[in-house]
Amino acid sequence: MEKKILPYTIHDWSSYSGKYHPYNIAKHEPRKVESRWSCANSKFFSKLDTQFILLKLKEPCVVTDILFGKYCAPHLCNLKEFAVYGGRDQWHLLLLLKAGLTNDSNTEAFTLQSQKENSNVFPFACKYIKIVPLQAHAPEFNLSIWYVELHGYNAPHCLSATEKQRVKELETKAIKYLLSYFLYKGNSQVCSAIAHHYQIPYMLSPLNLLYSAICESGDLCDAIRLFEEKVWKELSQRWKKEAQPKILTKEISLLSRGIGPRSGHQMVYNPQDNSIYHYGGWDGIETFSDLWKFSVETQSWSLLGPNQPPGKRVCHRMVLDSSRQCIYLLGNYFGTAGGSLVSPDVKPDFWKYNIKKGYWTCLSKDTSIEQGPMAIFDQAMTLNEKENILYVCGGCKWDPGDLVFETFYLYYVDYGIWERKLIAFKSLNANMNLLTERMGHCMEYAADEDLIYVFGGQTHDQEFLADMHIIDTSSWEAQSHDWSQCGKDCPYPAFCQRSSLDEKKKRIFAFYGYEQREYHKILQPSIWAYYIEQKQWKKVIDINEKIGNPHPCARKGLIYDRFGHALAVNWETETFYISGGNASSHPLKPMKLKDFWKLQINEEWGQDTVYEQVLLELHIQRFYELKFKDPVKAIYYLQTELQPKFKKHQTFWVQMITGIFKEKLGFEDLRRLRIETFEKICDLLPHCEDEIIPSDTLLNMVELF
């Protein structure tokens, strides 16, 4: 069945300015500047959703796409950000899309969330579509919409099928939330009756037994026995099936005395000599031109050259050619560094380092006059070793007044020739700006598929991105994916992340640090793995974070929060190496780091460590139960049972003992600790979607309505 253009009428609006009436958006007249809706006084809005325009369809339809027309030239009133809502009732609408338009003259179409491949959102019919403009490309300009077109289906059998499916799925989901809540209240018989009546297959999690022992009766002796004898046996059988990728982190040592705190440096791992090569960086005052080598075998650093020919570098990029044993270096931060202004007439040079002979060769003194990129920094680079072609994407060019970006280039190493490449897009709403005009992004080349993956980074308007473009190098066509509406199942929009491709297992690991949450940019480190065949993101569990040990991506302790760090990867041993970075995003408090970490992928990790950690949590809760009843018995239990059984630092036990005398537990405090212990155990242990686990709230049902 083909999609149709769905007719609509302008049902309601928040305001309009002068002759820019809402009715104008139904006509596509791109050469008439007055053919648009423009709301009033955009700079005085007190709420982001104050302004809106409400469209009413002739009949309920499954709206799959929305298309926006624009003026025939770029216009600062274009919507940098907007939201689209839909539903049968104008007072109860669901969010279908949150996106933005590029400031050009191209028509852009967007797929609505209700039609995307998302297991949490179901197709449904809409009678009303509400468009909420959030921000124009210039804050001082009014918000404008030039033209809107809706696409979808209105056939009766299509509407009937989608409505029935949505109602059934939402009903099942709502009942499962109710079952979790009744279990929390201890009404297991009510749960069984409800599930039987609605014919909903469900299974009680083995964790329910622990919940009853921990949270309801407070019998931690029984909880420990249940876990050791029954619960663990059931959960360990499904461990491999439900396992997420995991990383075990360890600080190797502080960097060599000669390598001080810095960010914007680069590292590459060379498998032939089992070494890491480290170049440049900036400590907040000085930019460096030193080349270091770290031997993985001897665990030691050596200085190969204090003042290397490429000169002082920061925010550059390096790529290793393993087969030819050389390193390519391109880019530098052409702006202000350490209070001094870099001259705008600086030339974009390009360098190659011969690893075996130990010297640098200048491949180009000025790539811009050789049809290559201009002076850039924070670009992305990757190498096709088989064809000996270097790919360069994006990066910011020097401009004292604004952020100006580069496009996509190929460098044919054998011939010393640059080629600027235009990418053709398959999706209607994508364009060249979305792919190339960005900085601080990632790019990986998959040799087996002959595909290039570009994702993340920052746009010219300093917005962070949560997208991915997959470029076929045989046809130079690209497919685009937007993860910004997928919530917790995907990374947040991010800038200056680091990535590496695991070709054997077909996955990309990405190390995030500087993320955008709604309208705030924060340091929130996390590690994600993108599985290429499944087209799915999975969050990587940091083992040390789970068990409370130091690690480089700590959420607590600002010293470990970072972005602008360096990453090198040994895929033979599945080991990542991370060094330095910015521990603060404040321009006046750069806070550079000088630590050096090893992160080891361990697919089978978990069973022994988690078993011990869950037992520790249970025994600690038993300690608190004794502390509530008899502090003396609690101290005796800690000294005779806890300390001999679990290996923790002495300060850990001292804090627990001194806490007895610092604070007195009330019953509500004890109940809170029981719930927190149960939640920690739930986070550590695997469980599947069909399981019903006790929950103390029904607020999660709000998303259904």
Image: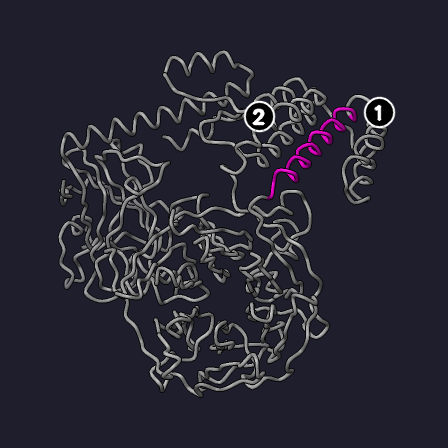
Residue toward you, 372 or 363: 363
Q: Amino acid at mark 1?
A: Lys
Question: Along the horizontal axis of the image, is 440 left or right of 108?
Answer: right
Q: Quadrant of residue 578?
A: bottom right
Magenta segment:
605-627
**Residue named by callout 1:** 633
Work out whether 26 lies above or below 371.
Answer: above
Question: Along the horizontal axis of the image, is 94 left or right of 676?
Answer: left
Question: Along the horizontal axis of the image, is 162 left or right of 452?
Answer: left
Q: Quadrant of the C terminus?
A: top left
Q: At numbered mark 1, what does the secondary structure look like: helix, strand or loop? A: helix
Is residue 622 located in the magenta-colored stretch of the structure? yes
**Residue named by callout 2:** 207
Identify the residue shown where x is 57% and y is 84%: 357
Residue 18 appears in the picture as rendered:
no
Work out whether 45 lies above or below 618.
Answer: below
Q: Position of residue 389 (x, y in %)?
A: 38, 74
Q: At numbered mark 2, what does the secondary structure look like: helix, strand or loop? A: helix
Work out whether 15 lies above or below 617.
Answer: below
Q: Amino acid at mark 2?
A: Leu
Q: Quadrant of the N terminus?
A: top left
**Mark nearer the N terminus (1 vs 2):** 2
Q: How is the image coloured?
A: one colour
